[in-house]
Amino acid sequence: MSTPPWAGADGPAARSRPRGTAFLLSQVGAHAAARFAERISELGVIPADVGLLRMIAARPGRSQQSLAEEMGVVPSRVVALIDNLERKGLVERRRNPQDRRNYALHLAEEGTRVMTEMRRLGSAHEDDICAALDHTQRAQLAELLEAIAAQQKLIPGVHPGYR
Amino acid sequence: MSTPPWAGADGPAARSRPRGTAFLLSQVGAHAAARFAERISELGVIPADVGLLRMIAARPGRSQQSLAEEMGVVPSRVVALIDNLERKGLVERRRNPQDRRNYALHLAEEGTRVMTEMRRLGSAHEDDICAALDHTQRAQLAELLEAIAAQQKLIPGVHPGYR
DNA sequence: TATTGTTATACTCTATAACTATA
DNA sequence: TATAGTTATAGAGTATAACAATA
């Protein structure tokens, strides 16, 4: 790990001033993301897979192209990701008889099962990360973060770090 | 970008429930980290460099080995990072006459100048990220994040994502 | 000629392990 | 024999661009 400049110096003098909020945000955020990745690894998926599965579940039959656009990645990246999910039996590529150029992507049965597991893990993750806060504080934190997210024009549900 | 499962589904029904706090944390945190990396790129350094410079500034004369341990990376990784900083004239490798196996690392003049710039950028970054919040809210956010960081046993100033 | 998906290629990042020089 | 640092190598991840099939 490295220490960004806004982290405060190492000496006792510097320790006394409050650590930067932006640094704390990115430190705690990275920790949360790492812990989540750890958790879902037991399902054999990576964070990018989680996003793909959710996008397919939300709109079954969509094409790889549309996923690439929404994820902000190049189509060839989606090929590899879907290859993986298909090999694990989580997703099915079905030929579209109307337009045989693209695939209609669907969750396989195992994919649906994994999605259920992911929701369970997501809840546990939430409780783990917020264990230090009571119900009121969690709501407070969420409110503050949502204010930042809105002002920074972050798209709800889209995670710039998970590709 | 992908959407983790705790992000809420895409449909209107799912939109209605509050987005997970853990997701928001990692989303906003990743955004903050990316913006910071963007900012410091004008200085020609990456986040890992920033950490190295700070560690060297805090304890001049230390060895590459000690940096590797504190960063939690392999020594060969430090070689490349210091190579870069030396090539840019930010850091000097000085032979230790007592033990000619290791180097004593010091900031070069340019390195000190860059550190000053980094502090300036760090302040601007802080104001940018927290622009949506007033002074009281920033303190509140910092308090909540510090509670999480402490409970999760995060080491102050050590960023798991910046290596 | 345009579009979807795939493959080939190359580039970056990083870890492992062998190696050099010093002790 | 042990330690600090370096280099060589290989592997993962990912983007670019050429390509095949279909429209």
Image: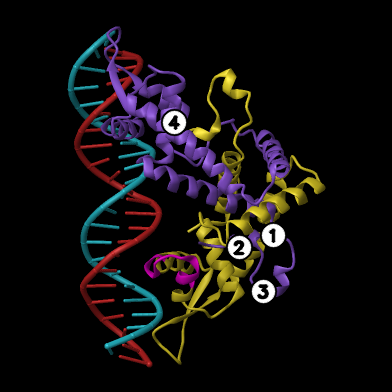
Chain colours: A yellow, B purple, C cyan, D red
Specify which label sits upstream in the sequence, 3 or 4: 3
Whole-number angstrom distance, CA of label 2 to CA of label 1: 8 Å
- Residue that numbered label 4 is attached to: B116
- Residue that numbered label 3 is attached to: B11
Q: Are marks 2 and 1 in contact (CB under 8 Å)?
A: yes
Q: How many marks?
A: 4
Is the magenta region chiefly helix, strand or loop?
helix
What residue appears at the point 56 percent right and 67 percent down from the top-left corner?
A53
Residue A4: in sight, yes or no?
A: no
User: Residue A39 or B76: which is nearer the viewer?
Assistant: B76
Q: Are marks 2 and 3 on the same chain?
A: no
Q: Are marks 3 and 4 in contact (CB under 8 Å)?
A: no
Q: What residue span does the magenta drawing correspond to?
A: A67-77
Specify which label sits upstream in the sequence, 4 or 1: 1
- Residue that numbered label 2 is attached to: A157
Q: Amino acid at mark 3?
A: Gly
Q: Residues within 10 Å of mark 3 (few under 14, many from 20)?
A: few
Q: Are marks 2 and 3 in contact (CB under 8 Å)?
A: no
User: Residue B141 or A110: which is nearer the viewer?
Assistant: B141
Residue B29: in sight, yes or no?
A: yes
Query: In the image, is residue A70 part of the stretch drawn in magenta?
Result: yes
Name the chain under label 3. Answer: B
User: Residue A129 or A95: which is nearer the viewer?
Assistant: A129
| Mark 4 vs mark 1: in front | 4
Residue B4 image offset from top left, x and y in percent: 59, 60
Q: Are marks 4 and 1 in contact (CB under 8 Å)?
A: no
Name the chain under label 2. Answer: A
Q: Is residue A53 above or below residue A26?
A: below
Question: What number is the disc on residue B19?
Answer: 1
Q: Which of the 4 quarters of the picture holds residue B51?
A: top left
Q: Are marks 2 and 1 on the same chain?
A: no
